[in-house]
Image (cartoon, rainbow, N blue to C red):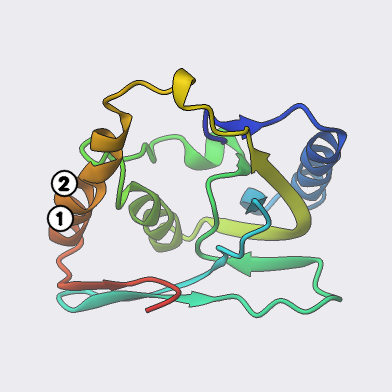
Amino acid sequence: MGSEDFDFSTMEVRQGIDKLLDVMNSHPEIAVSGGRHQNNPYEGFLEYKPGEYIKEHRLTVHPQLVLAPVDLMVNYFLARVDAIHGLPWDERMKIGGEHGDWFLEMKQQGKKVLWVNGVKINAQPHDPAKQRPEYPRFRGRAKELGHKIFLDKRNIKIYRGFDN
């Protein structure tokens, strides 16, 4: 899984994908293994109290940590097709909420997710000439549409991210 603006061309990324594949081959119980985007920490755990809230808790990473089971990570990962079959992203949430919703569903179904330290990808350089003029408006739908659908679907009033 990766976004259209990820730069898959570097040797570091290719080596990282090999590392993810090695992890998947060594741990058949794992449904998803992934890394970081721009080396920003976005791996952790989801605390869910139906009717009330969802709270993200960031994984504490120390230098010796190589692999860590998590509930949530950035959208840069490998997944076993058979493990995620029947778990599509909710198409009603184009941007905003779909990510947390999918990983929460994975957690609720007992699917194992593993974060792999040292695996990362970067975005391609931003070039406004290659971006459609409507893109900022589509990105803006996150809070107006996607997050509201996510809150309603999960019967929660509050979603607290890692930094809230």
Within 10 Å of disc 2 (Cα), the crowding (few <14, some 14-19, many 20+) is some
83 with respect to 9 (left or right): left
Q: Which residue does the image show at 46% across and 35% down from the upper left?
A: 85
Out of 158 and 113, give the one closest to the viewer: 158
* Callout 1 touching callout 2 (CB < 8 Å): yes
Image location of residue 70, percent across then percent down:
58, 67
Q: Secondary structure at mark 1?
A: helix
Image location of residue 37, percent across then percent down:
62, 50
In the rendering, which numbered label is found on residue 148? 1
Disc 2 marks a residue whose amino acid type is Leu
Disc 1 marks a residue whose amino acid type is Lys
Q: Residue 73 is drawn in which quadrant?
A: bottom right
Within 10 Å of disc 1 (Cα), the crowding (few <14, some 14-19, many 20+) is some
Image location of residue 152, percent across then percent down:
12, 58
In the rendering, which numbered label is found on residue 145? 2
Q: Secondary structure at mark 2?
A: helix
Q: Quadrant of the C terminus?
A: bottom left
Q: Which residue does the image show at 57% across and 65% down from the upper left?
A: 43
Question: From what the image shows, is residue 149 above or below residue 13?
Answer: below
Question: From what the image shows, is residue 149 above or below residue 127?
Answer: below
Image location of residue 105, percent across then percent down:
37, 55
66 with respect to 29 (left or right): right
Q: Which residue does the image show at 55% across and 63% down from the upper left?
A: 42
Q: Quadrant of the N terminus?
A: top right
